[in-house]
Image (spheres, rainbow, N blue to C red):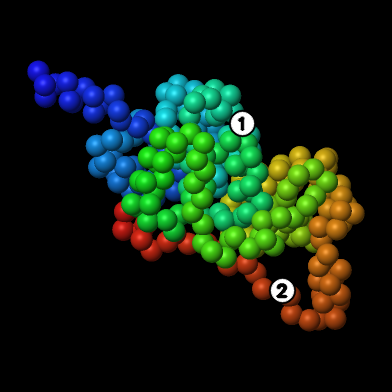
Amino acid sequence: MATQSIRALTLQAQIRIVVVDGYHLFRTGLVSLLTSVPSFAVEAEGSTGAEAVTLCRLLRPDILILDIELPGPDPHEVLTDVFRNSPDTKVLILSMNDDGAQIRELIGIGASGFLHKSIDYPALRTAIHCVVMNSDQLIIHLPQKSLFVDDWVAQKPSGLISKRELEVLSLLAEGMSNAELAQRLFISVSTVKRHLTNVYRKLGAVSRVDAARRAEAAGLLPGRRLRERSAISGSPSLPRPGRSHLPEQWRETS
């Protein structure tokens, strides 16, 4: 009888978790790790922003572990819809993205923490417990370089525009197509479209030309004329940004 009561108490105390990440191997590895903890119950997993919203509406989990590089709606819309459908769910962002402006925006919407995927598993486990036990606590785990001020702020006509969105804007202003943008930045076309949607919303733009014009007027593309002059003079173009890779400590589990 006593054993049954303890087991019932343990089940009652389990933290109910939903995991949404677009990388199947990474997601299944993370779910495997989480399910090995007796106090965690992974109730579902998904791979898109729309699935994150649906799962939270149906299951009302304690914790949503969410990547923000997902197909579908942009992270701002996903978080807003999650909190509308499941207001008591705590959201932990787990992502390779360390763009300070976007982190600040998502925390402003209500995310309880932002964890870079370089985090080790014990720290992730601790973060989950801390968020559940202390509703007012904010958990941030980022590489040190991400905390420099220049990476965190870039003012625009309506709030903050992220470093990645500035990259998209700069290439858009050079006349690149979505496919060319995706190839240059090593991201998918759907991710390019999501960034463009965010840019249009934040700048109040209605087209690609309008976005470029508004960005120039706001001083967000100070290097554009320099690149144009370099192209005319035959100088080498600026180097392409590198591609992010999954951290070494996650690969064995993903």
Give x and y (percent) for residue 9.
23, 24
- Residue occupied by mark 2: 238
Choose between 6 and 111: the one closer to the eye.
6
Residue 174 left/right relative to 7: right
Mark 1 or 2, nearer chain start? 1
Q: Please tell me whether residue 105 is drawn above or below residue 216 in the rendered image.
A: above
Residue at 82%, 77% in the rendered image: 230
Label 1 with label 2: CB-CB less than 8 Å: no
Residue at 50%, 40% in the rendered image: 137
Residue at 44%, 48% in the rendered image: 23
- Residue occupied by mark 1: 80
Identified by mark 2, the residue type is Leu
Choose between 115 and 3: the one closer to the eye.
3
Label 1 crowd bin: few (<14), some (14–19), many (20+), radius 10 Å: some
| Whether residue 21 can be seen here | yes
In the image, farthest residue toward the top: 1
Q: Please tell me whether residue 67 is drawn above or below residue 187 in the rendered image.
A: above
Identified by mark 1, the residue type is Thr
Choose between 126 and 195: the one closer to the eye.
126
- Which picture quadrant has residue 44? top left
Residue 193 left/right relative to 50: right
The local secondary structure at tag 2 comes to loop
Q: Please tell me whether residue 175 is drawn above or below residue 66 in the rendered image.
A: below
Give x and y (percent) for residue 3.
11, 24
Give x and y (percent) for residue 26.
39, 50
